[in-house]
């Protein structure tokens, strides 16, 4: 009998120890239902389990309970008690209650009971913020972007009501880049085009973005250089628990991939990492002026003209090769560590994509308005049709870290993205009714284009909350951007109905090499102070004060070189024939000479 009792006692002891070991956590974020403000120091308990926790000064909490189904009770002085029933806590798991709204305490205090069946998503949090915002606001969340499968921020932003995208630039309510501002985490960014007020959105990959928020009305805490819209790209924050993710994908289109007719041109291995400008730099080291009459000068002028013409790459025409599959790869790792009433968080993420597009019947047409005002129909002016091959590589990396203790928080985010676009075109141009050109002219055009864009941004943020209710936020963000279009080659040869090719300047013939570069440095700083209080009518009012400063330094340059023939030549329509057979020769003093 004693043996049976001992066995039962041991079994119960092991069962109790096992039960004690089976614990999980419950997390969430607590907000004021009226103002959408974060609520600090709220207690989180359960009548059916020991354990619990408190919300920090950002409203977040992470409380431990025994595994099982429990009612979670949230209490804060001056607010209604909220009870959340049927919360399932799993052994070693983490249950996310999402965003929890609690109202201010009425004369008769009553508990609010809700039943939770699934976690609140970031989409609903964005909708809540939209309802409470004093601005006319819209946006899209990470969840919505993932469901649709957008590849970059430009595609995602185009799905926001009132927003359209053209060439990577955002238009809000029909107002273009001069009237729309694009920012990163609330801080201004350097542009990638000297003629634009904003930055191209297609340079931001989806895997590093949490939300895209579009503000369509002005408030004093925003910069005063926009009227159409303020587009805020918010990058990923650190995780509330340890997270590791890897994702890879392949894309196939029968018309575009494994196509032997795909157009491309030479480059370097650096293009695989969006770094192809090095193989296309100006061969002289830096741009220099070359007069057209150089070949006529004495003291070796003809030899200099020959050397200059031969210094550049001789490739002017497109080549065909098989296109590959679209590929993408993303990886991220993040964690949050709580130790000695301090919280440390970090997040590391990187992404890479390589895509191919091929259009064998591309058509570009230009229309003009008839001079007769009674004629409303547009007149076809120019027609371009042909084949285009595009290879785009985009890679990016993000690292952020955060430290919180008491009512202080310090965080930093480093973001880098780099994009390379290689575009090769073979186009037949026809002048139908362009009054500024040779009517009826036909040109065989070959365009070799490469564009490399980079953006690096660092954000350091400090937040401090005082017992008086004031919250102070300081942000400093230096950013560096560059946009390079090295050695863009345009070759246009005139031809007639008998396919006899000529270099006819009057008809638009040209052989041009264009170099364009932009580097911009931004130093952006911002300080905000805010406090919420109740007026006499018990309405919650928020007072915000702040200051901001932005310093910009920009370096921009455009260099162009042209080839012109000295003498007459029999052309066959192959652009490479010019550089392989007819470049300027110092002995004969004939050929295509370089100037610019």
Image: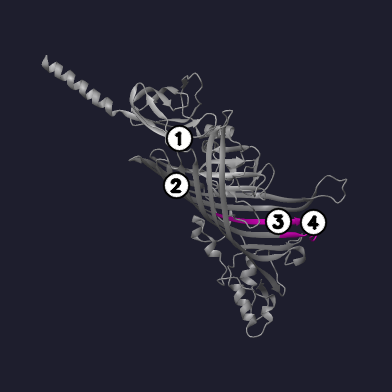
Q: CA distance from mark 4 to mark 3?
A: 16 Å
Q: Earlier in the sequence, mark 3 or mark 1?
A: 1
* 102 on left or right of 220: left
Q: Hey, which residue is sitting farthest bottom in the picture?
A: 299
The residue where tag 3 is placed is: 428
Task: Identify the magenta region.
Answer: 419-443
Q: Looking at the image, can residue 589 be seen?
A: no
Q: Label 3 near label 4: C-beta < 8 Å?
A: no
> In the picture, which quadrant includes the N terminus?
top left
Q: CA distance from mark 3 to mark 2?
A: 55 Å
Q: Secondary structure at mark 3?
A: strand
- Across and down, in percent, residue 500 comes to 74, 64
Q: Is residue 429 magenta?
A: yes
Mark whose residue sits in front, 4 or 3: 4
Q: CA distance from mark 2 to mark 4?
A: 57 Å
Q: Earlier in the sequence, mark 2 or mark 1?
A: 1
Disc assigned to residue 434: 4
Closer to the camera in the image, 98 or 536: 536
The residue where tag 1 is placed is: 59
387 vs 571: above or below? above
């Amino acid at each position: 009998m004693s043996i049976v009792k001992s066995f039962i006692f041991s079994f119960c002891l092991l069962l109790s120890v096992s039960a004690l070991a089976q614990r999980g956590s419950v997390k969430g974020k607590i907000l004021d239902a009226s103002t959408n403000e974060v609520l600090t120091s709220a207690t989180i308990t359960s009548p059916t389990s020991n354990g619990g926790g408190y919300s920090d000064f950002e409203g977040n909490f992470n409380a431990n309970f025994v595994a099982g189904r429990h009612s979670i009770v949230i209490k804060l002085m001056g607010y209604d008690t909220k009870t959340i029933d049927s919360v399932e806590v799993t052994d070693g798991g983490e249950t996310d209650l999402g965003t929890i709204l609690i109202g201010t305490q009425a004369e008769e205090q009553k508990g609010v009971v809700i039943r939770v069946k699934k976690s609140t998503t970031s989409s609903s949090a964005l909708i809540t913020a939209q309802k409470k915002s004093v601005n006319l606001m819209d946006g899209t969340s990470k969840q919505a972007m993932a469901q649709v499968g957008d590849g970059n921020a430009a595609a995602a932003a185009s799905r926001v009501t009132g927003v359209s995208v053209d060439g990577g630039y955002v238009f809000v309510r029909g107002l273009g880049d001069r009237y729309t501002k694009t920012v990163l985490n609330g801080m201004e960014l350097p542009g990638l085009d000297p003629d634009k007020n904003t930055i191209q959105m297609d340079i931001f990959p989806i895997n590093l973005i949490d939300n895209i928020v579009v503000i369509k009305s002005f408030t004093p805490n925003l910069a005063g250089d926009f009227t159409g819209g303020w587009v805020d790209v918010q990058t990923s924050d650190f995780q509330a628990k340890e997270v590791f993710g890897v994702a890879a994908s392949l894309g196939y289109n029968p018309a575009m991939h494994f196509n032997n007719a795909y157009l491309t041109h030479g480059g370097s291995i650096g293009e695989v990492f969006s770094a192809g400008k090095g193989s296309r730099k100006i061969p002289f080291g830096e741009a220099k002026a070359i007069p057209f009459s150089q070949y006529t000068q004495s003291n070796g002028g003809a030899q200099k003209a020959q050397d200059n013409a031969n210094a550049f790459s001789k490739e002017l025409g497109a080549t065909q090769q098989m296109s590959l599959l679209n590929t993408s790869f993303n990886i991220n790792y993040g964690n949050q560590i709580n130790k000695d009433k301090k919280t440390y968080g970090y997040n590391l993420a990187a992404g890479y994509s390589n895509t191919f597009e091929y259009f064998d019947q591309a058509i570009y047409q230009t229309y003009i308005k008839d001079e007769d005002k009674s004629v409303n129909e547009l007149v076809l002016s120019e027609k371009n049709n042909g084949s285009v091959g595009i290879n785009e590589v985009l890679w990016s990396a993000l690292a952020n870290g955060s430290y919180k203790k008491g009512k202080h928080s310090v965080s930093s985010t480093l973001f880098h993205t780099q994009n390379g676009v290689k575009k090769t075109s073979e186009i037949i141009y026809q002048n139908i009714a362009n009054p500024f050109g040779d009517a009826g002219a036909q040109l065989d055009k070959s365009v070799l284009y490469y564009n490399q864009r980079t953006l690096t941004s660092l954000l350091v943020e400090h937040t401090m909350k005082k017992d008086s209710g004031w919250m102070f936020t300081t942000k400093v963000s230096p950013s560096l951007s560059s946009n390079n279009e090295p050695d863009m080659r345009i070759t246009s040869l005139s031809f007639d109905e008998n396919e006899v090719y000529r270099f006819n300047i009057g008809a638009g013939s040209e052989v041009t090499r264009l170099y364009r570069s932009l580097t911009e440095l931004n130093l952006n700083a911002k300080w905000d102070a805010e406090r919420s209080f109740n007026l006499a009518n018990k309405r919650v009012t928020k007072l915000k004060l702040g200051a901001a400063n932005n310093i910009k330094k920009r370096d921009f340059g455009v260099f162009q070189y042209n080839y012109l023939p000295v003498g007459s030549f029999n052309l066959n329509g192959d652009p490479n024939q010019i550089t392989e057979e007819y470049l300027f020769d110092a002995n004969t003093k004939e050929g295509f000479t370089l100037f610019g």
